Image (cartoon, helix red, strand yellow):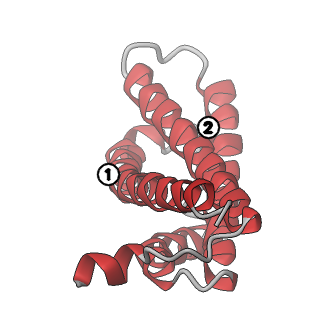
Amino acid sequence: MLILLIFDFDKDCTIYQSLFWICCFGLVLYSFILLISRLLNLAEFNDNVRDTISYCNKLNKSIKTEYLTHFVVCVLLLFSKNFILFLSLAPLVAWHCYKYYKHHHYVDPIELYHSLKEHRKDGIISLIVLSLVLVWLIIKGTICNVNLLLYKNQ
């Protein structure tokens, strides 16, 4: 019964809901790829420390884009009444909003060595949360698309 409640096996999946799941999946996947590239860049920074200013500028742009995609997905989930996904992503978005408001998201070339561990920790936590949301979106979107295909002709 719990599985039926969580995954909502209904026949009322419309083409708009299917497109919604595809858009959310694309945004979360884009954010996931940005996050992985940020973590790889942080790991690469230990080996190559020559050009810290351009490295930090590139990293700051990707962080802002990642925060924006998290916020957009969270708002889409809230307006579409997907409260379980919204509640799983909302603490991460709240943390990102706090960091953005306090300017802790900004990677300073001078303080990079001191804040490298904190940026990695935040990235790994975000990666875990986004992995769970991505798996949930795959399951929910697949169920919606299968229901749309199965019950379309009935």
* Residue 50 position (above or below residue 102): above
Separation (CA) of disc 2 from disc 1: 15 Å
Kind of residue at badge 1: Lys
Q: Hey, which residue is sitting farthest right in the picture?
A: 16
- Front residue of 42 and 27: 27
* Residue 51 position (above or below residue 105): above
- Front residue of 19 and 83: 19
> Residue at image x 43%, y 74%?
9
The total number of labels drawn is 2
Upstream in sequence: badge 2 or badge 1: 2
Query: Can you give x and y, in whole percent of width and height, for residue 82 in the image?
Result: 54, 80
Which residue is under mark 1?
Answer: 121
Question: Could you say whether the residue bearing mark 1 is in a helix, strand or loop?
Answer: helix
Mark 2 crowdedness (10 Å alpha carbons): few <14, some 14-19, many ≥20: many
- Front residue of 117 and 94: 94
Question: Could you say whether the residue bearing mark 2 is in a helix, strand or loop?
Answer: helix
* Residue 59 position (above or below residue 1): above
- Front residue of 34 and 25: 25
**In what quadrant of the picture does the C terminus appear?**
bottom right
- Looking at the rendered structure, which numbered label has been put on residue 59? 2
Hey, which quadrant is residue 3 in on the image? bottom left
**38 relative to 54 in the view: left or right:** left
> Residue at image x 61%, y 37%?
59
